[in-house]
Amino acid sequence: MKKFKYFLFILLLAILSSCKIMNQADWLFYDGKIYTANENFETFTAMAVKGDKIVDIGDSDTLLKRWKAKEKINLQGKIIVPGIIDSHCHLIGYSVEMEPIDLTGVRGVDEMIERIQIYLKQHPDLRFIYGRGWDQNLFPNMQMPNNKLLNKYFPDIPVYLKRIDGHAALANDAALGLANINNETQIDNGIIQKTNDELTGILIDNAMELVEKYIPPLPVSAKVSSLLNLQNQALQYGITSINEAGINYDDILLLDSLQKENQWKLRVFGMLTLNDDNINRILKQGIYNNNKIVVRSVKLYADGALGSRGAYLLEPYSDDSNNRGILLLDEARFDSIAQLCIKYNYQIATHAIGDAAVSTIINWYTKYLNHNNDLRWRIEHCQILNPSDISKFVQYRIIPSVQPIHAIEDMHWAQSRLGDRIANAYIYKDLFLQNNMIAIGTDFPVSPLNPFINFCAAVYRQNISAYPLEGFQPDQALNKEVALRGMTYDGAYANFSENIIGSLEIGKKADFAIINNDILKATPQELANTYSIATFIDGEIVFLLKGNNIIR
């Protein structure tokens, strides 16, 4: 009898002990492959989430014994990655524009006109025609177009068609007249193109602003609809955070209103567009941090784009011997902004594509950055570099923020612009090796929002058809772990948020995606068909693929 009582006592202790070990979680994911993207790039099979945090991560057997959960999800071998951070895009800027006619892939002005006419049949009351996406490098002669055909077909309605990079536009005479642009019009840091003293309709960089201020604004309801549609697209790809590369005060208020209504889920790290309103109402009030909306950065433009020959080069363009591009920023203006940013603890992120632009910005940065700074000033794009500037990224702890997809998009014509300088362009591996860090973004809508196409460009230096066979400048490819970290942890670090997001670690926010393919093993063709099965932000499902067999 005593032995029996002793046995019952030991059994009771075991049961009580077992109860203490079994902690309560909201979600328990097991039997998968979890890429943590932490410092050692560890891989596990199980993860527990409680509230908005990751509370445990490890092997499936251990976590199944340690945790009870409201929802136990057998991943069936599927992959979990940290929520993708798009380190440079224009999601909000694109959403609040008048809806553009899609001109992506057109082969000439005649195709632009065809698409405009189709759009006009569907929108007969249109009083201003706005399109975006053309690229003269796809035209038979690869030359910038003129507006003669636009004037013929649309003599009375303003037509304004933005190039794919957003740094050039084609306007018809009605749009030029609306903006009072004539042969005598001058604009600082911009080009109003002429041929034989006749306006062609091509406007580059700051000259575009003369017409853009006349584009009819979208109603708020249309802005909201567009924003939510683009948010849903981002979530379908496992994107949980974006860097909005140019945001205004009104956009911030709009996002906040949607956040309060529980409609806006994405984390937004905003770079303020440079104007007096934003400086006075946001920057001078200190860091803006309202849950998922954080603004502590200022966006500057040093130059234009390579495709429209506005990128600022040390030597003339190989295919335009009288042109070195345009420097859009002067040193006095930069200094005034830099001093404000230091005073109010704001980061600087500068668009610089040409080697002269990158070199100029680095030189200006070094006046304020010592070797041990933690200001995390960024250079966006970094497409062409003077080799002597590369080591300065580590010397002054400058963060390169790049878009690998641009290398693949530009490879067919970039050498004609640069000649031998192509060897110093799109050198993402060399940039990464400076600080062992590289923030990766898509530059949507210049390029697709799909981060897995971007990943393909980074690691294979190919498009999703595995072209070119050997890769474009394959020695500059990033390895797959580096590329995934660039889309997650490094993006978080570039936003001062690496302690809360960017990797899957205990105590961090539960931002992650269950995806259908193992991207560390996927071919270019498989990456083209990679998507999220479920996307989580703060431990909440914000996207769930219909008909999936993982989460019901």
Image (tube, rainbow, N blue to C red):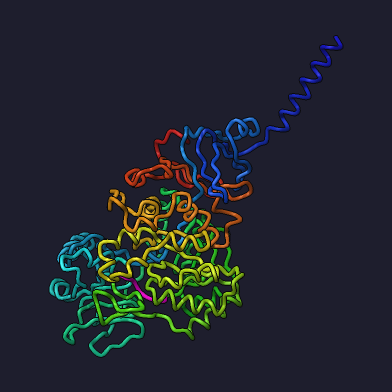
Residue 394 in view here: yes
Residue 82 inside the magenta-drawn segment = no
Q: In which quarter of the image is residue 516?
A: top left
Residue at 42% from the left image edge and 70% from the top image edge: 387
Q: Position of residue 104 (x, y in %)?
A: 26, 60
Residue at 45% from the left image edge and 46% from the top image edge: 543
* Residue 113 horizontal side relative to residue 534, left or right: left
* Residue 24 horizontal side relative to residue 409, left or right: right
For the record, the magenta segment spans 302-307
Residue at 77% from the left image edge and 22% from the top image edge: 12
Q: Where is residue 281 in the image (x, y as percent from the top left)?
A: 54, 75
* Residue 46 horizontal side relative to residue 117, left or right: right
Q: Looking at the picture, does residue 504 appear above or below residue 302?
A: above
Q: Assign the N terminus to one quadrant of the image.
A: top right
Q: Position of residue 94 (x, y in %)?
A: 37, 64
Comparing 221 with 421, the one in front is 421
Residue at 56% from the left image edge and 37% from the top image edge: 46
